Image (spheres, rainbow, N blue to C red):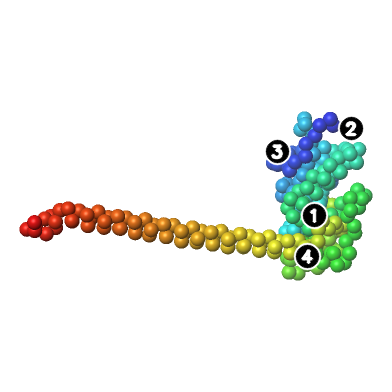
């Protein structure tokens, strides 16, 4: 089935009815996903018919793809790459350095995702595991926690795939560099204001000085021409 025209956008409350039907058909945990409505990017026909959707849950500089589903299986091959391109744009706009997923479709490994190593798993944010987990006590490789996470996010497996979008150290250095540039700009703006203040102060005093000199000149001239007003009885 091909749609001649379609749009991709972030889900809104108006899309909830269609998404709930989609999630139910996919046998996802609908109540859990309702709370994550704004995670979802969707693709729909110009007539408003929902084609498919996938969630992107963001935590800090990392994101998790979850709960991908399409109204008809034959639509997946055609439209999943379109949604992926949309998700990738959103991720880069948020400056994300790494993406995670438990999505099982072969497409994701073709898109560059790879099974997470033990070292990579240590970087998995607790928020991607279960929302009510205490970050102080969770263990990244806890099998029970990972399986529960998969169910809560609408995934069927507990195999984590990850894709690094950019070097995490470079991203941190870039952020630090941007902060330094901001501080420099602020310092330059402050110095500019101080210079402007000094210039205005000098200008005000200069004007006052000119007014005093000119006033004094006319006062002296007035006294010379009218000495009797200042010194009564003088001729």
**In front: 147, or 164?**
164
Q: Label 4: state its secondary structure.
A: helix
Residue highlighted by disc 4: 169
For the residues labelled 3 and 2, the Cα–Cα distance comes to 25 Å
165 versus 4 height, above or below: below
The residue that appears at 87% across and 67% down in the rendered structure is: 118
Q: Is residue 31 visible?
A: no
The residue that appears at 75% across and 58% down in the rendered structure is: 61
Q: Position of residue 124 (x, y in %)?
A: 80, 62
Tell me which label, 3 or 2, sits earlier in the chain.
2
Tell me which label, 1 or 2, sits earlier in the chain.
2
Q: Nearer the viewer, mark 1 or mark 4?
A: 4
Few, some or many C-alpha atoms within 10 Å of disc 2 (few <14, some 14-19, many ≥20)? few
Few, some or many C-alpha atoms within 10 Å of disc 4 (few <14, some 14-19, many ≥20)? few
For the residues labelled 1 and 4, the Cα–Cα distance comes to 20 Å
Q: Position of residue 116 (x, y in %)?
A: 88, 61
Outermost residue to the left: 233
Tell me which label, 1 or 4, sits earlier in the chain.
1
Q: Are marks 4 and 2 in contact (CB under 8 Å)?
A: no
Q: Label 2: state its secondary structure.
A: loop
Tell me which label, 1 or 3, sits earlier in the chain.
3
Residue highlighted by disc 1: 64
Residue highlighted by disc 3: 14
How many numbered discs sit on the rendered protein? 4
Name which quarter of the figure residue 119 lies in.
bottom right
In the image, is 205 to the left or to the right of 222? right
Q: Are marks 1 and 3 in contact (CB under 8 Å)?
A: no
Q: Quadrant of the N terminus?
A: top right
Q: Nearer the viewer, mark 4 or mark 3?
A: 4
Q: Which mark is residue 1?
A: 2
């Amino acid at each position: 089935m091909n749609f001649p025209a379609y749009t991709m956008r972030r889900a809104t409350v108006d899309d909830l009815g269609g998404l709930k039907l989609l999630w139910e058909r996919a046998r996802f945990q609908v109540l859990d996903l309702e709370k994550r409505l704004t995670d979802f990017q969707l693709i729909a026909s110009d007539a408003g018919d929902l084609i498919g959707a996938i969630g992107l849950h963001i935590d800090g500089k990392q994101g998790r793809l979850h709960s991908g589903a399409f109204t008809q299986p034959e639509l997946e091959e055609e439209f999943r790459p379109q949604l992926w391109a949309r998700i990738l744009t959103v991720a880069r706009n948020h400056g994300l350095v790494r993406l995670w997923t438990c999505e099982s479709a072969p497409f994701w490994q073709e898109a560059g995702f790879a099974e997470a190593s033990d070292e990579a798993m240590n970087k998995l944010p607790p928020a991607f595991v279960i929302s009510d987990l205490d970050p102080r006590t969770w263990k990244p490789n806890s099998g029970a926690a990972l399986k529960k996470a998969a169910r809560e996010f609408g995934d069927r497996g507990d195999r984590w795939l990850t894709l690094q979008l950019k070097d995490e150290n470079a991203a941190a250095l870039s952020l630090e560099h941007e902060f330094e540039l901001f501080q420099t700009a602020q310092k330059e703006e402050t110095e500019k204001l101080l210079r402007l203040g000094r210039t205005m102060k000098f200008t005000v005093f200069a004007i006052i000085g000119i007014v005093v000199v000119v006033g004094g000149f006319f006062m002296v001239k007035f006294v010379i021409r009218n000495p009797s007003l200042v010194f009564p009885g003088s001729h």
